Image: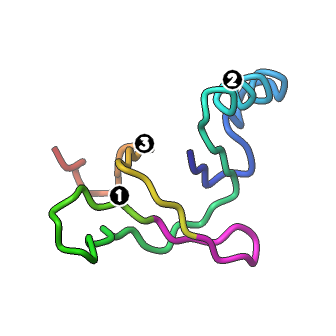
Amino acid sequence: MLERKPAILGREEPELARRLGGLLAGEGVELQSGVEIERVRIARDPAGTGADAAKVVRGTVGEEQREWHAAEIVVAGRPYSQPGRPRPR
């Protein structure tokens, strides 16, 4: 789970965020906060077997470049809005 902000649940109590982070880690979820995402791509199967390709997210944490590989990517965020323009549907 990648989070752009310095911590998950930034508006909630820090103890709640710490406990949720612990629960997610216990389920095998890697949690990384402070991520600035630069690129998302699909890693092609080099053997050409047609196997499911991994999704790759590239970004930085502080000054460190990193890549994360996953079977699926789910994106959450605020709805897009721009002053004077209607929201896309």
Q: Nearer the N terminus, badge 1 or badge 3?
A: 3
Give percent across and percent down for residue 74.
38, 44
- Determine the image quadrant of residue 79: top left
Which residue is pictured at 59% across the width and 66% down the height?
Answer: 36
- Quadrant where the image shows the C terminus: top left
Could you classify mark 2 by the number of other residues whose Cα lies within 10 Å: few (under 14), some (14-19), or many (20 or more)? few
Q: Nearer the N terminus, badge 2 or badge 3?
A: 2
- Determine the image quadrant of residue 85: bottom left
Q: Is residue 61 rendered magenta in the image?
A: yes
Could you classify mark 3 by the number of other residues whose Cα lies within 10 Å: few (under 14), some (14-19), or many (20 or more)? few
> On the image, numbered disc 1 is attached to which residue?
82
> On the image, numbered disc 3 is attached to which residue?
76
Q: Nearer the N terminus, badge 2 or badge 1?
A: 2
Tag 1's secondary structure? loop
Tag 2's secondary structure? helix
Which residue is pictured at 63% across the width and 61% down the height?
Answer: 35
- The stretch of residues the image draws in magenta is 57-66
Q: Which mark is residue 23?
A: 2
Spatial separation of the CA atoms under disc 1 and disc 3: 18 Å
Q: Amino acid at mark 2?
A: Leu
Colour scheme: rainbow
Tag 3's secondary structure? loop
- Quadrant where the image shows the N terminus: top right
Which residue is pictured at 35% across the width and 57% down the height?
Answer: 82
Spatial separation of the CA atoms under disc 2 and disc 1: 36 Å
